[in-house]
Amino acid sequence: MTAGKEKVVVIGGGVAGLTAGTYALLAGFDVEIYEKNAIPGGECVGWNRKGFHIDNCIHWLTGTKKGTELYEVWKKVGALSDDTEYAPIDAFFSSTYNGQSATLWNDLKRTEKELIEISPEDEEEIRKFIEYTEYSKQCLIPAAKPMEMWGIKDYMKMGASMKDFPKVMKEFGKISITEYSKRFKSPLLRKMISDYLPGDYAAYSFFVSYATMADGNGGVPMGASLQMSLRMEKRFKELGGTICYNKGVNKIVIDKKKATGVELEDGSFVSADHVISTVDTHVLFNRMISSKYMPKELKKAYDEPKNYPAISGFQVAYAVDKDFKAEGETTFIEIEPFKVGSRTFNRMYVKTYGYDPVSVNGDRQVIQTCISQFDDDYEVWKSLDKDEYKKVKDALVAEVTRRVEEAFPALKGNMEYLDAWTPLTYERYCNAYHGSYMSFITTPVVKQLRLKGQLKGIDNLYLAGQWTSAPGGLPVAATSGKFAVQRLLKNQHRDINI
């Protein structure tokens, strides 16, 4: 520790923790990050199996468009640079049904033309879909400072830059994706609208997601998720930060209204002038500090899982021939129904990773599938003992394998199983609430959860991480890490521009 400098202890070495740590270093603090795992990244990681790399996280990274506020954050923390190479992906995803396929290309005009050719009877709704996707390009994540620090000029600037987006929110903010899909007459287009995000999501989420890709603001950095996390770790260390691996935090020590430091899982104590927690909020308020500090809006979300569902997945990875191509990098297929967790599914996707050398070995590439899982599904997985868990997982892998081979006969006998993971994997590795890899889903029936980042009753504890704002994800993790440091600086009456 440098003499005269205040020390910030960051709990968690994921994207939020690395971002908070880097900004705290830039603000002149000594910083120590404590991470329970052996590598950085949290859920922004990947792993190797049988000579292949499995990417767990990035399907697209919001904030890759130069000139946006979020891009500047990614640059500042070392995740991206002006010469970052992105995967040559030209579409959001493809959907297939009854021998037909439809693709949402990054080129909106091409999408419009092809969808109308598929379903002329839906022309009016298709043109509206494209128009509102164009409007949704204006929905950029504000990353300069927390909104409670905004002034009138900030709101005027946002209003001017997002002049058309309120039309999207007005029409699609209060209906679900499932409801929206029923506006289309074509069964294929109904499937397409419902495929990518869970049907309970507010429909505007789908427009914003597609618009991010179509606007060039959702690239996939080459090298996969773990490599991005390692770049962030490198930046943090170069600035003088210390990251301690295999050092989980047991609790935050509170004396009166101040966090004096943290107690590690090995029982040792680490003192701190300021603490930034980036861990899952369920762990924070049920283990690290008293639940009496939990904000009422967060307690409401935990108490009402039907209104605030958490999403996870049952996922399987295989190695197949490198020349295998589906309709696109991500292709949704109709399958023979089967049960995973508590529910039965008749759709799933196959994603190919042959575009990135890190997921290629010789003439073989990684492909992956995912079946969405929610709170009730998690409870099914959680009820299994160790032997039952393995048995169920192995049986489901066989079911998934058969369905992929049925959809793509060229893969029959050519699929080498690499790995499978479940909601319990995320719970074990990341302490994730109900095994969720994002925050609460934004549904049409409730107000989007957004925490203020500071708690009543503790003066020097700051919150960051994707659980501070629905629907979570990497952009929320990164911006919340920056905002935590800016809140600290404001409390010290210092310049927040870092």
Image (tube, rainbow, N blue to C red):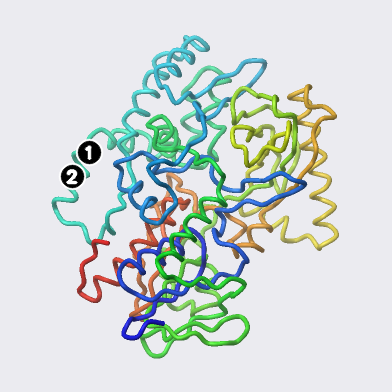
| Residue labelled with disc 2 | 157
Q: Report whether 104 appears left or right of 372.
A: left
In which image quadrant can residue 247 be found? bottom right
Task: Residue type at mark 1: give it.
Answer: Ser
What kind of element bears circle 1? helix
Residue 46 visible (yes or no)? yes
Picture quadrant where residue 286 is located: bottom right
Residue 316, above or below 96: below
Q: Is residue 463 above or below residue 470?
A: below
Spatial distance from mark 1 to mark 2, Cα to Cα? Answer: 6 Å
Quarter containing the C terminus: bottom left
Asked whether the viewer can see residue 296, the reply is no
**Type of amino acid at the residue the image marks with label 2:** Lys
Residue 227: x percent and y percent? 55, 51
Residue 120: % across, % down = 47, 9
Q: Is residue 358 left or right of residue 480?
A: right
Q: Residue furthest left?
A: 152
Residue 195 to residue 153: above or below: above
Sort mark 2 into few (<14), some (14-19) or many (20+) by Cα contacts within 10 Å: few
Side of 349 where 208 appears, left or right: left
Q: Callout 1 environment at 10 Å: few (<14), some (14 to 19), or many (20+)? A: few
Residues at marks 1 and 2 touching, judged by CB atoms closer than 8 Å: yes
The residue wearing badge 1 is 161
